[in-house]
Image: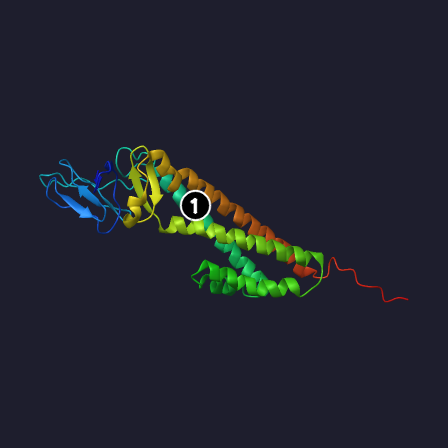
Amino acid sequence: MLTLVRIGPDVGEEGLLFGPRSLPSANSGRAVVFGAFAIRRPMEQLGILLNGAAMASRHEDGEVIEPISDDWRKPAGVEYALDEPKFMAEYGRSMAAWGNVEHALSSVFATALEVKQVHHARAAFHSVISFRDRLGMIDAPMKMVTTSFPGEQWLKLSQEWARLSDTLNKASRHRNVLAHMHVWHSPLVGTFGWKDITRISELPMDPDERKKVTVTVERMRDYRKSFESCTRRVRDFEQDLLKAMENPMRDVVLPSTQK
């Protein structure tokens, strides 16, 4: 394991450090200062996960220890991080759920444009990096589609798209948190997500307070459920849009031309 010692009067804590420049000194007992922390190398052995890749650890006599197992069901960290497999599994499910959101939106984009080559429209949608810009790509044709005909169905579609866009923007912030966080271990907390090492000093030392501000398995599960809800709403919206486009004047009562 690695011991992270806060520089200053605060009590130190143990945790597994992630990062491309976090390798400690090869000499026994020597600490390498990195930002607000020092990393102390224990006498026995050292195991490091560097950007998610397992590295072999070494005894003091130079004997190489086998790398950490590739079996995702086994914890790959310190002894108090037994929840790591569950954390990583939920992490993957959450990110996959967000992928379904964007896939559903690409279909709405193609529907709004009424293109014959749906995959071409999808490719154009996914070629844009920013999620906000992707929503903007849908906003422009959607305003034209929902205002080209009179009728209650188009008003409802316009209002639902406005609500849905707002929900999607909020959900994308959660996705960004997951995409850019680092994974850490801490006693009495276990595995959690937080920002990079330059922000680790902002974490509360109290375990209960730390759980309130970090990404836990429970919080990720809530994020995933919100992503799944977004996907269902996007798909339902597309079905309502298709029905309206098939009969754009469905609920419009035209004035009688007979005297």
Task: Looking at this view, name the residue that lies furthest to the left.
Answer: 61
Q: Is residue 23 visible?
A: no
Q: Is residue 38 visible?
A: yes
Residue 89, image x and y in percent? 38, 41
Q: Nearer the viewer, residue 90 or 207?
A: 207
The kind of residue on which mark 1 rests is Ser
Q: Nearer the viewer, residue 190 or 61?
A: 190
Residue 16, image x and y in percent? 25, 41
The residue that label 1 is drawn on is 94
Task: Looking at this view, name the residue that lies furthest to the front.
Answer: 9
Q: Is residue 40 left or right of residue 239?
A: left
Q: Tell me the quarter of the image containing the C terminus.
A: bottom right
Q: Is residue 33 above or below residue 190?
A: below
- Image point 37% across, 39% down: which residue? 87
Q: Tell me the quarter of the image containing the N terminus.
A: top left
Q: Is residue 98 above or below residue 216?
A: below
Residue 52, image x and y in percent? 29, 47
Task: Looking at this view, name the residue that lies furthest to the right.
Answer: 259
- Image point 19% across, 43% down: which residue? 39
Which of the 4 quarters of the picture holds residue 90?
top left
Q: Secondary structure at mark 1?
A: helix
Residue 57, image x and y in percent? 18, 41
- Image point 36% across, 51% down: which residue? 180
Q: Is disc 1 surrounded by few (<14), some (14 to 19) or many (20+) residues within 10 Å?
A: many
- In this figure, what is the number of numbered marks? 1
Q: Is residue 253 left or right of residue 216?
A: right
